[in-house]
Image (tube, grey):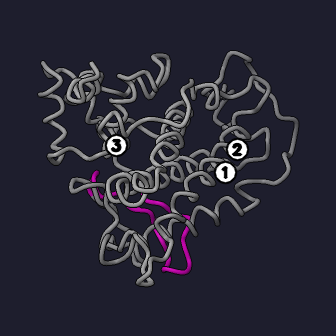
Amino acid sequence: MPSPSNHSVSSQSSANLSSKLPPLPASPSLSQSIGMMGTGEEALNAYHLPRPLPLWLNPTAAKHIVKGNFMTLSARPKTVEQGEWIAHQVVEHYRNLWNFVRVIYEKEEDGKSICNSATCPRMSAGTNHSYTWLNSRFEPIELPAYEYITLMQRWISGKIDDTNIFPTEASGVSFAHNPQITTTALLTGPDDWIGKRSGFPKEFFNICQTIFLQMFRVYAHLYWAHFTEPFYHLNLEKQLNSCFSHFVLTATALDMLKPAELEPMQPLIDLWAANGTFPPESKAYEYANLKVGTRLMQMAGLA
């Protein structure tokens, strides 16, 4: 089993992906672990970030296309069944993410993509986090980021296109039990599960959690390895920030990501909580360390 900083998703082979996934280890989030530290500087240092800090942690580079509350996009409409809402969010965020992946897959003049085996020999998010793939013998192996992302893309697409997991038609009337419940469905017993009333299988929720986790890893790689080149140099950083902040708000609101799984991007989450991007009523805000976010703003002369 891989270590907590070295998660993996399984595969039968590079071409034939298995639906069996290993259990993911649980651990407290980094922000929770250092939350009791006295100053923002001490808490920031506990993240062991490279210095100078990555560009995406500069508040001037962490801006969005428009100002607004992304919670309005993440909250489930009162009349929509929980399973249908989760399925909708999986498809929409997957579509948003791969718009950015296509940018790093574009061929340069030398015929190579920006993300290749030389520039990104392993799937990583900075020096402290890397991810392995499981081969046909369920052994963790390191792959170039480009290959890892391609295999993962096939796996996610296969799940979304599988009508046994994402049925094209609901098997019954979809409704919400309680209009006030907008994040967690009301289950009536062990024989009930999220999405059952709309025709989704029992394993649907766990599969969606894994999809969101894998999409998060791609976002983390984009920020750590490719934020400056190409996104910042192409003036696409605001679009990337907007989609990622919306993604984090949605994933946390729907319990698709656990606090510990956010660790590679925790400082940016802290910053967005401190500068008002994440509203106080959101889980993303709850998972943030405001001391770190405030310190990042102070370092930029904004607080």
Mark 1: which secondary structure? helix
- Name the residue carrying label 2: 88
Give percent across and percent down for residue 29: 30, 35
How much space separates mark 2 and mark 3, taking CA atoms? 24 Å
**Rendered residue at 48%/37% (across/down):** 245
Type of amino acid under label 3: Met
- Name the residue carrying label 1: 91
Residues marked 1 and 2 touching at CB (< 8 Å): yes
Q: Is residue 48 visible?
A: yes
Magenta-drawn segment: 3-23
**Rendered residue at 56%/34% (across/down):** 254
How much space separates mark 1 and mark 3, taking CA atoms? 22 Å
Give percent across and percent down for residue 282: 49, 22
Type of amino acid under label 1: Val
Give percent across and percent down for residue 148: 43, 69
**Which sits in the foreground, 97 or 36?**
97
Quarter of the image where one finds residue 271: top left
**Rendered residue at 73%/26% (across/down):** 77
In the rendered view of the protein, which quadrant contains the N terminus? bottom left
Mark 2: which secondary structure? helix
Number of callouts? 3
- Name the residue carrying label 3: 265
Image position of 104 (left or right of 180): left
Instruction: Answer whether residue 20 is magenta in the image.
Output: yes
In the rendered view of the protein, which quadrant contains the C terminus? top left
